[in-house]
Image (spheres, coloured by chain):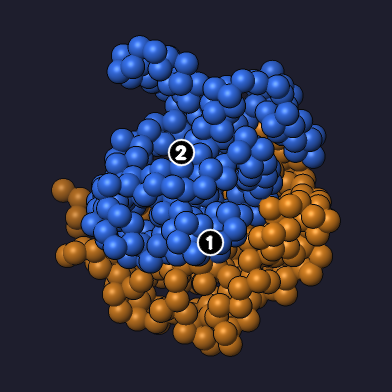
Chain colours: A orange, B blue
Amino acid sequence: MLELVNIDMAFGGVKALDHMSFKISDGSITGIIGPNGAGKTTIFNVITGVYSPTAGKIFLNGRDITPLKAYQINRLGIARTFQNLRLFTRSSVLENVMTAAQNHYINSYRENFLGSIQPAVKPDPKINYGFFDALLHLGRWRNSERTLKLNSLELLARVGLADRADQAAGTLPYGMQRRLEIARALALSPEILLLDEPAAGMNPEEVFELNNLITGIHKDFKLTILVIEHHMDLIMNICPHVICLNFGEKIAEGSGSEIQNNPEVLAAYLGTGEEEI
Amino acid sequence: MKRNIFLIIIGIALAFWPLGGYQEGIIILTCINCIAAMGVSILTGFTGIFTLGHAAYMALGAYTTAILTVRYGVHYIPAIIAGGFMAVLIAWLIGIPTLKLTGDYYAIASIGLGEAIRLIIENWQSLTRGSRGFPGIDPYTTRFTAVIIFIMLAIFTFNMLESNIGRELKASRDDIIAASLLGFNTPRTRMKALLISAFYCGISGALLGGYMSFIQPSMFDMMKSTELTAIVVFGGLGSMSGTILGSAAITLIMEYFRDISQYRMLIYGVLLVVIMVFRPEGLMGSRELWDFLKFGGKKNNA
């Protein structure tokens, strides 16, 4: 369970998040909506450790993860995608996924840096090699790389990019780049997946496919999903639980229909009568 | 695998092709320069950390090896390895405070550090004989030694870049935030790159000492550092075969035009300018030689 308690995030004088608190229960799909600049992406940045919050605490399964660095939080099982795609554009599609997958398997196996904190998923002992195996391309390297490659190809097939594996990631169409980001995040075998506007720039057909993809991976990978989106159809379809933000504050939380009929939410999106002159 | 066999064949050719003494010298020098350039390429081309001070690591390698072999009579092979590790040790000490810097800031810091190391060597007279230079080094760098070490390191480099560590370096080069959110400890990644590159430069310096039989601090000044980085940019940032080709090309040009002495710097300059104008991404871009062979140069055009 992920829990945010009274998170404040200020950039100079600007309060991007103001006493933000909510709980995400295991296995749920939660939608985060709100007008532009409401602080949605900031929430993701705070959870994943890109920013450390000005005040407040974040708990993952009861453990305080606020002081941890981004890569440590990631290894505890939180993966994300980015609103402004952050793929390794010069590398191939397959390499992008393998970069994430290797890290999950190889590095978490070799570096037990957190001491008492266990990585979220047990690494696969079949994928394990060290620096000297890599230098000499010994048998362990060959076997591990083969398994890694197969696993990554499987994930690519899951998001429908298997036939694009050798292409440079930067040359993919936009919608596919978004799906590749999802595959890369899945390669980390996360428990919690944060999707930042996964449908941005997609046509209705692609949004429909994405809809199926998200519900599919939610079931198959037993994920807890948090999704930021402007496509209301998508949110209403896949999220039983929705949180609405405005100006860094949570203004409503509840089921889709509750949110749709909440006067504050309507005011945030459409403005109130009094403000309109 | 095919690639490694290809490299070994090149190595055998370089080591055993019958050549005159002068040509042999050029082969040795090419190997030495290629090793240093590979080191800088790992840091600059594959991790995206621009450095202008790597000649200092060559100096560390050269002096460590020279002092060990001349003063303490150590055999040259362990001495060369010790030279590499001395460079690694100093790089580690330097890396802790400076690798927090990114982009241009690290480049500026590296100039200062490079010069500082050179000046320490120059002024530590009791150990290094200062600017008078360190003579009488046993000429252990034969053509055979240089080629073997170069080919070995080249194979290691390519192997390394094709495994987890290579992907890790490239990830932190292309997008450091994405890399840290994929679970990479990015400061540590950058440190790894610096240590590996320092090792290569240390080995290269050690071989240079054995080739020249005489080293002095001014051989490892900023000119040398800039030349190393220029070679990597010339060959293509993110292309190891480009680095090796570029380094070999520039070494050969510099050597074969030795007759016209200072004017060869003109050729060097013109060559760099022409490449940068017509192929801003460098000789090979971010592709390797075999990518061209396999896909007719169509891969990775982004």
Asked if the residue at tag 1 contacts the one at tag 2, i.e. Cβ–Cβ closer than 8 Å, the answer is no
Asked whether A189 or B261 is in front, the reply is: B261
Q: Residue at x 44, y 31 (%)?
A: B231
Whole-number angstrom distance, CA of label 2 to CA of label 1: 18 Å
A206 to A127, vertically: above or below = above
Label 1 crowd (10 A; few <14 / some 14-19 / many >=20): few
Tell me residue A239's x, y (percent). 59, 63
Identify the mark nearer the N-term, 2 or 1: 1
Is circle 2 on the same chain as circle 1? yes
Tell me residue A173's x, y (percent). 59, 32
Q: Using the image, name the chain to which the residue with label 2 belongs.
A: B
The residue to which callout 2 is attached is B212
Q: Residue at x 62, y 35 (%)?
A: B143
The residue to which callout 1 is attached is B73
Q: In this view of the protein, can residue A239 be seen by the observer?
A: no
Q: Nearer the viewer, mark 2 or mark 1?
A: 1
Tell me residue A55's x, y (percent). 30, 79
Q: In this view of the protein, can residue A15 be seen by the observer?
A: yes
Secondary structure category for the residue under label 1: loop
Compared across the picture, whether B155 is left or right of A38 comes to right
